[in-house]
Amino acid sequence: MALTNRKDTRAVRVGDIVIGGRNKVILQSMCTTKTQDVAATVAQINALEAAGCQLIRVAVPDMTAALALADIKAQINIPLVADIHFDYRLALQAIESGVDKIRINPGNIGRKDRVEKVVEACKAKNIPIRIGINAGSLEKQFLKKYGYPTAQGMLESAKEHVRILEELDFYDIIISMKASNVGMALEAYTLAAEEFDYPLHLGITESGPLFSGSVKSAAGMGAILSLGIGDTMRISLSADPVEEIKVGREILKSFGLIDNAATLISCPTCGRIEIDLIPVAEELEAYISEIKAPITVAIMGCGVNGPGEARGADIGLAGGAGKAMLFKKGKIVKTVDEAVMLAEFKAEIDAMYRLFKET
Ligand code: SF4
């Protein structure tokens, strides 16, 4: 069941997608390639798109990278975000290169005329700005006030950056309140959701390598999403960014906040197991990751608890002694030998996916 308590936020257009306004949570990632290496960056973006990434951010540390954005933009299908720190000239060049959004904190740009130039360029091209608050790089005045990074300090920092943009009559704003500490991120996002109606970009930053980072991200994002907060999300892992998308899709599936992903239900196995289920479940998990449709499949290990779950899924398989019952939309359609059950199961999944794409 999907969450029904989602906070209503302002809808902000980024290229051909809309973030906020109760749209589905947009899943994004960030390239790990050097931005000036256009071929490698485009290849990574295309791999991410195939995995389900809907928005991609690249680092823009210098003018070479800012100029390369035009070439990258010409070769990809999903909206492109330029990540810029401090230098307004890089922001202007990124906008000129055709990016769909920039991430820059206006309070860090410096002189007012420079901020105005960036804002005017964004207005001219209908490009939103993400204000990225990060507990690890909170401005000195807030660290001094509280002694160390706090959610309240993060909120005050966000308010200051928002004020600068609003004074220039600019409202195409997205805000992130990232922290690597789950409790602090939860508090910061809760405060931001109370304060602003701008869409929120969720992140538990620097969450760690694939395994521990995925668990931490799921705990943090799950807590925040369960409050109805969050319009776009990036999982931050010390891993291939494709893994970030896989993890993000699983988290969104858990909350019914994604409609272009298949879900696998599989039993944990126990002493009643009658088929070799674990390798089959692993193979199916990889197989359905390619499916961009809300199909639920279940694989269960025995005839005791298996049929119940298998019946509840769109397509289900419940093991028996050397055999398995195949269910479709709650009805048994056939009994197959264990040796061919996976092939039969995949064929049913393919058929349902074809049907989904045709209708
Ligand atoms: Fe055990 Fe059967 Fe339940 Fe799997 S479905 S955990 S084998 S009782």
Image (spheres, helix red, strand yellow):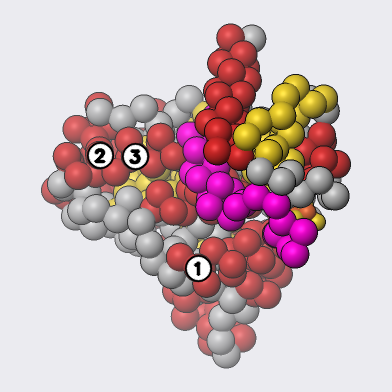
* Frontmost residue, 94 versus 118: 94
- Mark 3 neighbour density, 10 Å: few (under 14) some (14–19) many (20 or more): some
From the image, tell me which residue sits under label 2. 43
Badge 3 vs badge 2, beta-carbon distance below 8 Å? yes
| Outermost residue, front side | 321
* Mark 1 or 2, nearer chain start: 2
Looking at the image, residue 96 lies above or below residue 265:
above
Position in image of residue 355 (x %, y %): 62, 13
Q: Report the Cα–Cα distance between label 3 and label 2.
A: 6 Å
For image coordinates 46% across by 72% down, the residue present is 208
Residue found 62% across the figure and 34% down from its top = 337
Task: Classify the position of the C terminus by image quarter.
Answer: top right
Nearer the observer: mark 3 or 1; the answer is 1
Q: CA distance from mark 3 to mark 1?
A: 21 Å
Q: Could you tell me which secondary element the residue under label 1 belongs to?
A: helix
Residue at image x 47%, y 76%? 136
- As drawn, the label of residue 211 is 1
Task: State left or right for residue 256 relative to residue 83.
Answer: right
Question: Given the image, on which type of amino acid does mark 1 rest?
Answer: Phe
| Count of picture labels | 3
Q: CA distance from mark 1 to mark 2?
A: 25 Å
| Residue at the far bottom in the pictured view | 147
Which corner quadrant of the image does residue 262 belong to? top right
Q: In the visual, does 55 lie left or right of 150?
A: left
Specify whether residue 332 is in view.
yes
Span of residues in magenta: 268-292
Mark 2 Cα within 10 Å, few/some/many (few <14, many 20+)?
A: some
Residue 284 highlighted magenta (yes or no)? yes
State the residue position of label 3: 47
